[in-house]
Image (cartoon, grey):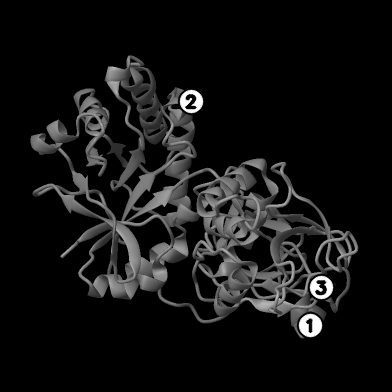
Amino acid sequence: MTRIIDVSYPCEKYAAALRSAGVETVMRYYTRDSVPSAAKRLHRPEALALSSAGLRIGIVYEGRYGDDIDYFDNDAGLKDGAYARMYAQHTIEQPAGTAIYFGVDTDADPRKGKDAINKRVIPYFEGVAQALAQDNGGATYLLGVYGSGAVCQALLEADMVQLTWLAQSTGWTGYKQFLDSRRWTLLQAMDTTIAGVRCDPNTVGAGISIGDFVLPVPAVAALGTAPAKVVNARNGLRLREGPGTEFGIQRLLPYGTQVHSLATTGTWTSIDLQGDGAVDGYVNTGFLIDGANARLGSATHLSAMRAIPEATPPAPLAGSDASFVQTLIDNGSSAEGIAAARKEAKSAVAGYPKNGCAAHLSALLRQSGIMVEMTVGAGKLAARLEKRGWSRIAVGQQQPGDVGAAYDSTDPPGSDHVYLVIKAIDDDRMLVTDNQNTANEPHTRSAHGKDGKTATEYFLRP
């Protein structure tokens, strides 16, 4: 029976099944980068769901280019360590004294003559250690490493890490020697599927603590018991993953949105959007005012907004597809995000970009946290999104984050296509991202087919 697994995507909906299958700890990821690893990132609602099911949580940090030895240097270590510490303490509320493993997901082979361990890996971990030990009032965490036997051995001998996680790649330098030394904390095996979750099983060294943890699950608060506040930023207020501008933006809260404030950290406030006592994110405190005394434009503004629910749509459930829309837009807007999607789609479709629209969009969805299957075929992908609960939206009402579907089921079939809306210029013209632009950037498209493209039949929205 496998007790410890590592998983590279959100798995809260499988938490109970995993626990029933005998899993005790789920290793999950932190990362400060938006692409391509944002889909791996653990969020607090998932951490609470895992803890509620009786599962413990372990953490591994992965940099954007964690499989490229040239990524590793002292500066990257300082930045990764500082982010991981802040995210652990303020977003996840990971208990002090538990561990964060930092991944070196490549074979830093000293036989190649590059002296990669001494010139790259050790300076990186010096930076991480410095950031984790900085005397700034933050929580302290044990430092671990995930990597080859040679990397684990070198960092132990340099007295830089307390915990080691030997990667499953048996061909990497020093694997057998470090395996036989029994100095590893965790030993990763080849991937498998447990309770519907694709994962890597792991073995723990005899009598060794791996630095995992369980979160205390807060009692569900009665709706509205937290102090009511209202967003007073005319152009909307950014909801962030942690208390600071270095944390990612989850979504934009419209002017007049009512929230429940939970706790204040410096100039930042953690808020609850659903009235259940759980933290949904952090906002700048200066843009919140007391709901009871708010006069936003007129004395009837708040009551009018409550009377018209569509004026301030309810916040998406954490972990649902809707909660990843802003990340999806960010990835679909950036050259790096589009390039990452292109690379994944190319591996799935022979002759890409031809006939690759669904694969391209599948890759964008997946790297943004919406874990659809890699799909070939526009109609097939649209159907899968509808099965996930996405709703059809009429042409002319599209907004950023919607998926346009331009296809039919006639024989012979029409010009099938799916794409992501980045910006609605008007009720027809849009800025979109798909496989049709050879540059890694969005381009314009007409919803009604005025540009010679197939007319869009409908849009899908989570």
SS for dot 3: loop
Q: Given the image, on which type of amino acid does mark 2 rest?
A: Asp
Q: Given the image, on which type of amino acid does mark 1 rest?
A: Ile
Q: Callout 2: few (<14), some (14-19), or many (20+) C-alpha neighbours within 10 Å?
A: some
Left or right, 410 with reference to 249: right
**Mark toward the viewer: 3 or 1:** 3
Can residue 9 be seen by looking at this rendering? yes
Q: CA distance from mark 3 to mark 1?
A: 18 Å
Label number found at residue 75? 2
54 or 294: nearer the eye? 54
Can residue 266 be seen by looking at this rendering? no
Residue labelled with disc 3: 397
Q: Position of residue 275 (x, y in %)?
A: 56, 76
Which residue lies at the image location 20% right of the left edge and 46% below the top edge? 186
Which residue lies at the image location 75% right of the left edge and 65% below the top edge? 254
Q: CA distance from mark 2 to mark 1?
A: 50 Å
Residue labelled with disc 1: 308
Q: Residue furthest front?
A: 412
Q: Position of residue 296 (x, y in %)?
A: 83, 68
